[in-house]
Image (cartoon, rainbow, N blue to C red):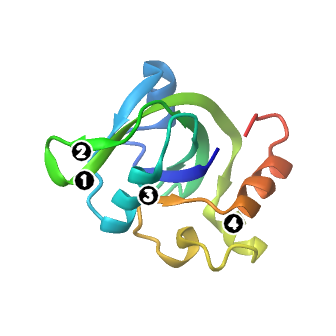
Amino acid sequence: MRYFLAKTEPSTYSIDRLRQEHKTSWDGVKNPQAVRAISEMRPGDRVFIYHSGGESSIVGLAEVGSVPTPDPKEAKSMIVDLEYVAHITPPTGLSDVKKSKLFDDWALVRQSRLSTMAVPDRFVDWMRERHPDVKI
């Protein structure tokens, strides 16, 4: 199982909405690096959901529910289904990630505009320690 992170503005699509709908098609990604990350996702992989737009926090966890397919609305993009797994409470803020100094080389810290990315294994372990009540 691999782990990824996907950013969303909560006013556009929130973790609460994903919980309510149970499943969504993750689309609208245009950055080539982010599209590459989506194309690497496989069913059963996990995705940390990150609220941007002022919150700057990891707020939940989803599971990849489909193989990536070309986005019919955007020729150079890919879409994938995500299914709700859990909220992460309390959310893990970007400030906490940065303060740890453990992930300075990760795209979340280095490339603030990148919307979707692979997650390093050591971050998954770090999150498990911080949130033992969530099956990460």
Which residue is denoted by mark 4 in the rendering? 97
Question: At label 1, which amino acid type do we have?
Answer: Ser
Asked if the residues shown at circle 2 and circle 1 are in contact, with their CB atoms under 8 angstroms apart, the answer is yes
Residue 77 disc label: 1
Q: Residues within 10 Å of mark 3 (few under 14, many from 20)?
A: some
| Placement of the N terminus among the 4 image quadrants | top right
- What crowding class fits label 4: few (fewer than 14 Cα within 10 Å), some (14-19), or many (20 or more)? some
Query: Which residue bears the numbered disc 2?
Result: 70
Secondary structure beneath disc 1?
strand
**10 Å neighbourhood of mark 2: few (<14), some, or many (≥20)?**
some
Q: Is 42 in front, or is 4? A: 42
Kind of residue sitting beneath label 2: Pro
Q: Nearer the viewer, residue 101 or 121?
A: 121
Cβ atoms at labels 4 and 3 below 8 Å apart: no
Mark 4 falls on what kind of element? helix
Dot 2 or dot 3, earlier in sequence: 3
For marks 2 and 1 on the same chain, the one whose residue lies earlier in the sequence: 2
Q: Is tag 1's residue or tag 3's residue first in the polypeptide sequence? A: 3
Mark 3 highlights which residue?
Answer: 37
Whole-percent x and y of residue 109? 57, 73
Task: Tell me if 88 is positioned left or right of 118 in this view.
Answer: right
- Residue type pointed to by label 3: Ala
Q: Is residue 102 above or below residue 87?
A: below
Which label's residue is closer to the chain start, 4 or 2?
2
| Among the 4 quarters of the image, the one containing residue 26 | top left
Residue type highlighted by circle 4: Val
